[in-house]
Image (spheres, rainbow, N blue to C red):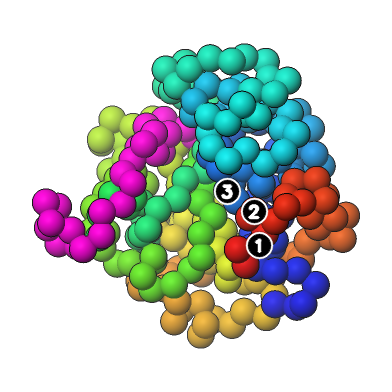
């Protein structure tokens, strides 16, 4: 990395660029919300944001502190409920959702439930699914923003909270989930990761500036695939960084974590 931007700034700017104008995205708080706000302020002014607590289509004036923050309804097209938001996902109308977890595996399955071998007596009890399993099952494309290390990127999850491609090709559809839906991109502090169309395994699409293949492999607990003609992630433009710092997160609630 250069000293012109932090890793979290690169991750947010990169994720923002994945949201096309006119799309619908369900977001939570933190980095995903910052990415959606940044996209709405720059390249995707007609991006529709949805929040799990019922805010639909707001123009966020400031970073909300929760999905139920009153700011998630500001100038929105609808102030509704979780039931309506999930029903909209079930109808196949939502293009993207941002999700996260303590663990992710090669097929994009996520764990936000527990760490350990015994569900009744885990080493760590995590917050659980919330709406993550529903969103990961019903939205067309799942985006993840997360740091990359061997604790998070594991060969086998301790618990599957949210289905990715499950065990591989055809498994998601066999479970009754919408054909063509599933994990789309994973944006980390080291790389942009996608999923191979045939094997459904995670593959590296681009390395961030200054990151080596050895560093990437050492930070991953399973074998990665690599896209032919591996790219280097473009750095954020000065204008994008300025908007992120001045308008999206001026108080550095998210950016200050880096």
Magenta stretch, residue numbers: 116-140
- How packed mark 2 is, by other alpha carbons closer than 10 Å (few <14, some 14-19, many 20 or more), is few
Residue 3 placed where, x, y %? 77, 77
Residue under the image location 58 percent in, 31 percent down: 69
Check disc 3 and report its element: helix, strand or loop: loop
**Mark on residue 30?**
3
Q: Quadrant of the C terminus?
A: bottom right
User: Does the segment drawn in magenta span residue 122?
Assistant: yes
Check disc 1 and report its element: helix, strand or loop: helix
Residue 127 placed where, x, y %? 33, 46
Which badge, 1 or 3, is on the more N-terminal residue?
Answer: 3
Q: Nearer the viewer, mark 3 or mark 2?
A: 2
Q: Which residue does the numbered mark 2 point to in the structure image?
A: 253
Check disc 2 and report its element: helix, strand or loop: loop
- How packed mark 3 is, by other alpha carbons closer than 10 Å (few <14, some 14-19, many 20 or more), is some
Which badge, 3 or 2, is on the more N-terminal residue?
Answer: 3
For marks 1 and 3, give the CA distance.
11 Å
In the picture, measured across the screen, residue 28 lies left or right of residue 119, that is right
In the picture, measured across the screen, residue 130 lies left or right of residue 227, that is left
For marks 2 and 1, give the CA distance.
6 Å
For marks 3 and 2, give the CA distance.
8 Å
- Tell whether label 2 touches label 3 (CB within 8 Å): no
Q: Which residue does the numbered mark 1 point to in the structure image?
A: 256
Which quadrant holds residue 202? bottom left
């Amino acid at each position: 990395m250069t000293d012109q931007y932090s890793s979290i700034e690169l991750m947010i700017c990169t994720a923002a660029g994945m949201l096309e104008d006119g799309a619908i995205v369900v977001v939570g708080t933190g980095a995903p919300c910052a990415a959606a706000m940044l996209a709405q302020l720059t390249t995707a002014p007609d991006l529709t944001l949805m929040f799990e607590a019922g805010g639909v289509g707001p123009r966020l004036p400031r970073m909300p502190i929760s999905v139920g923050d009153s700011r998630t309804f500001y100038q929105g097209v609808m102030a509704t409920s979780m039931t309506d938001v999930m029903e909209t996902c079930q109808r196949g109308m939502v293009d993207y959702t941002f999700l996260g977890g303590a663990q992710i595996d090669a097929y994009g399955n996520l764990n936000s439930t527990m760490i350990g071998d015994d569900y009744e007596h885990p080493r760590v009890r995590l917050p659980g699914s919330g709406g993550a399993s529903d969103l990961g099952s019903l939205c067309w494309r799942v985006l993840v923003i997360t740091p990359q290390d061997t604790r998070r990127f594991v060969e086998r999850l301790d618990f599957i909270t949210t289905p990715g491609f499950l065990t591989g090709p055809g498994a998601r559809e066999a479970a009754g989930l919408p054909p063509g839906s599933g994990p789309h991109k994973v944006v980390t502090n080291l790389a942009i990761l996608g999923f191979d169309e045939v094997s459904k395994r995670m593959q590296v699409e681009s390395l961030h500036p200054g990151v080596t293949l050895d560093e990437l492999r050492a930070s991953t607990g399973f074998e990665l695939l690599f896209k032919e003609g591996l790219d280097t992630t473009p750095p954020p433009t000065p204008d994008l960084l300025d908007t992120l710092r001045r308008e999206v997160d001026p108080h550095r609630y998210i950016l200050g974590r880096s």
